[in-house]
Amino acid sequence: MEGTWGSTGSATRRNVLKGIGATTAAALAGGAVPASGAAETSDDAVTLGDFESGLAGWRGVGETTLDRVAKSERPAAVTSGDHALAATTDRTAGRIENEERVRNADLVANPSLFATVTPGRIPGSDVAISVRFRLHYVDDGLFGDDTGVVESDAQTVRPHAPAVVSWDLRELAETTRADATKLEIDWSPATDSASDSLDSDAGEAWTVVVDDVHLTDDGDRIRRLRLGEHFERLQFALGAYRSTEVHLRTEHLESGEFVFASGSSVPYTVETLTDDGVEFVLDGVEYLFGGEWL
């Protein structure tokens, strides 16, 4: 049976999942919403870089140089406002950093970090780009203050495809977040080959555009992005989404399969939990929304 959502309990599921990327939402709710790379910045967001009037305290590290780029020049990459940050290097890897904005931000009250990243193509290569956040903090040790560094998992971004990268800082101790001193965003070739150098001479300059760097208290948005990215990976592997086959639907539970162009199908389950949260399981991977996970 092909369907969207049942009437009972559907409002809760729609509200929780309405921010998922367009492809996923089409499968789940039959509606059109912004794609996963689109801007979704809350009015309460703490801005770490919108680049409308300058570089916002960001600096290039090593051979990475910074400038602003206008929406008229890179309309797809400038996702918020009229300007974004253009980071240019002739290396295959690059890094940018900011101290002032991070020192003045409350990472305890706003532990969800986002940035929109649009990499160019590394000269002579079609490889995707691996993007990470790195957070420096004061570490009060036995022998006085020292500096520690923690980093996010790598997130893969395709060349010329805007993507929202994120980090749930709740995985860090509150003391680490409270004592943050510097934020870095770095990128390198996404490769599984140990023989490939992640930082080498690229032969010529290339640019990564960064926009809308901000903090919020919206943990659900990170999980929506992760679910949207998962669904997009499935489409890349199995072909475009074609239909939803619902096998079971009750007041609090729906399960079935997403069918793709290749004829392959992937199981999903969505359950409304007792604390008003929603558990979404896609192909065996669990995503939790609302409730105690907010």
Image: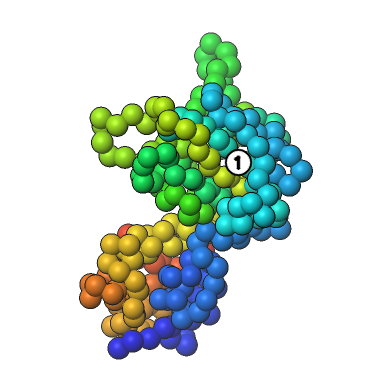
In this view, 217 is above or below 202 = below
* Residue at position x 68%, y 49% in the image: 70
In this view, 214 is above or below 271 = above
Q: Position of residue 19 (x, y in %)?
A: 53, 66
In percent of width and height, residue 199 lies at: 40, 28
Q: Tell me where residue 138 sits by quadrant.
A: top right
Tell me how the rendering is colored. Answer: rainbow
| Residue 233 placement (x, y as % from top left) | 34, 60
Residue 62 seen anywhere in this rendered image of the structure: yes
Q: Residue at x 47, y 58 (%)?
A: 225
Q: Nearer the viewer, residue 130 or 11?
A: 130
Quarter of the image with the N terminus is bottom left
Q: Image point 71% across, 58% down: which residue?
A: 43
Front residue of this view, candidates 99 and 242 = 242
Tag 1 secondary structure: strand
What kind of residue is marked 1? Ala
- Report if residue 50 is visible in the image: no
- Residue 31's place in the image compared with 110, above or below, is below
Query: The C terminus is located in which quarter?
Result: bottom right
Expressed as whole percent of the image width and height from the top left, the position of residue 15 reads 55, 73
Left or right of 145 in this view: 48: right
Residue at the spot of label 1: 86
In the image, residue 129 above or below residue 76: above
